[in-house]
Amino acid sequence: MSTYDDQNIFAKILRGEIPCHKVFENDDAIVFMDIMPQSEGHSLVVPKAASRNLLDADPAVLARVIPVVQKITVAAKTAFQSDGVKVVQFNEAPAGQSVFHLHFHVIPVYEGVPLRP
Ligand code: 5GP
């Protein structure tokens, strides 16, 4: 099984080694804007605890982080006045994961506006 590598880009952001546009933080997670947004308001909810993805995540961490995902989903809908919100999460490269620190995409969706790839 693949192991966690603390040189991944989100670990560096969490340590403050790389800047980000942070929009929320609590004891369990930070939320920052995606550098390549698929739509206006696309953000990433990133747990502070080290795990590659859901496959090795601590359920106790997830129990504290999912309420953050919900809060940001609600904020994405209201702040960006979107018509819907897509929440996406990938596990390992074949599934589309490119940064190997657990994260949840929160992507506002606007009627008639396709998401950018
Ligand atoms: P995934 O691993 O779920 O496929 O996607 C990783 C996401 O992280 C991508 O949407 C990508 O645009 C975003 N990303 C990659 N590097 C950075 C970075 O340095 N800063 C920020 N804010 N987002 C990043």
Image (cartoon, rainbow, N blue to C red):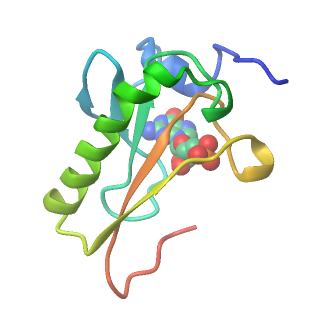
| Residue sticking out furthest to the bottom | 112
Find ligand 1 in the image and state its quadrant.
top right
Does residue 93 appear anywhere in the picture? yes
Residue at image coords 44%, 21%: 61
The location of residue 103, given as percent across then percent down, is 51, 37
Decide: is 40 above or below 88: below
Decide: is 44 above or below 8: below
Q: Quadrant of residue 42?
A: bottom left
Residue at image coords 38%, 82%: 113
Is 58 on the left-hand or right-hand side of 4?
left
Does residue 20 appear anywhere in the picture? no
| Residue sticking out furthest to the right | 1
Choose between 43 and 17: the one closer to the eye.
43
Q: In which quarter of the image is residue 44?
A: top left
The location of residue 39, given as percent across then percent down, is 39, 65
The location of residue 111, given as percent across then percent down, is 32, 84
Decide: is 2 above or below 89: above
Choose between 90 and 16: the one closer to the eye.
90
The location of residue 26, given as percent across then percent down, is 25, 21
Q: In which quarter of the image is residue 41?
A: bottom left
Residue at image coords 57%, 26%: 9
Which image quadrant: the C terminus?
bottom right
Is 27 on the left-hand or right-hand side of 14?
left
Residue at image coords 49%, 53%: 36
Q: Number of marks in the image?
A: 0
Which image quadrant: the N terminus?
top right
Choose between 2 and 38: the one closer to the eye.
2
